[in-house]
Amino acid sequence: MVTGARLDAMDDEALDVLLAEPSELLLCRVSPEHKMRVVTAFQRRGEGTGLAGPPPSAPRRGQQ
């Protein structure tokens, strides 16, 4: 499990090492910026990526 705070403490090299480990990656309590950082790191490794869900600027349920 990787939190936003843990991602903030990692430099790109440490993130690359984490992503090279053969395991599932669970991100929790992360911002859209954190998600994009992970996507970019996977892309640096030549891996296909994708994101699902509403864009960060979409109104949340109950908001207009």
Image (cartoon, grey):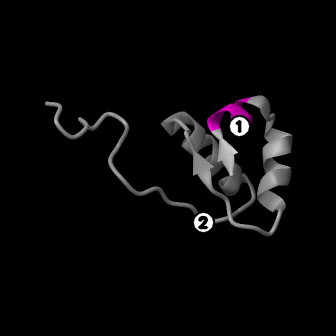
- Residue 58 placement (x, y as % from top left): 27, 38
Left/right of residue 38 with respect to residue 54 in the rendered view: right
In the image, the segment drawn in magenta is 4-8
Point out the tag, 1 or 2, that comes first from the N-terminus: 1
Relative to 8, is 32 on the left or the right? left
Point 65% across, 41% down: residue: 3
Q: Secondary structure at mark 2?
A: loop
The quadrant in which the C terminus is found is top left
Q: Check disc 1 and report its element: helix, strand or loop.
A: helix
Residue 13 location in percent, x, y?
85, 42
**Mark 1 sits on what residue?**
7
Report the residue marked by disc 2. 48
Name the residue at 73% across, 36% down. Answer: 6
Residue, far left: 64
Image vertical order of residue 8 relative to residue 61, above or below: above
Q: Nearer the viewer, residue 38 or 24?
A: 24
Name the image quarter holding residue 46.
bottom right
Between 44 and 24, the residue placed more toward the observer is: 24
- Residue 57 percent across, percent down from the top left: 32, 33
- Up/down of 8 relative to 29, above or below: above
The 10 Å Cα crowd at callout 2, few under 14, some 14 to 19, many 20 or more, is: few
Tell me where residue 19 appears, x and y as whole percent: 77, 56
| Badge 2 amino acid | Gly
Residue sitting at x 21%, y 40%: 61
> Looking at the picture, which amino acid does disc 1 mark?
Leu
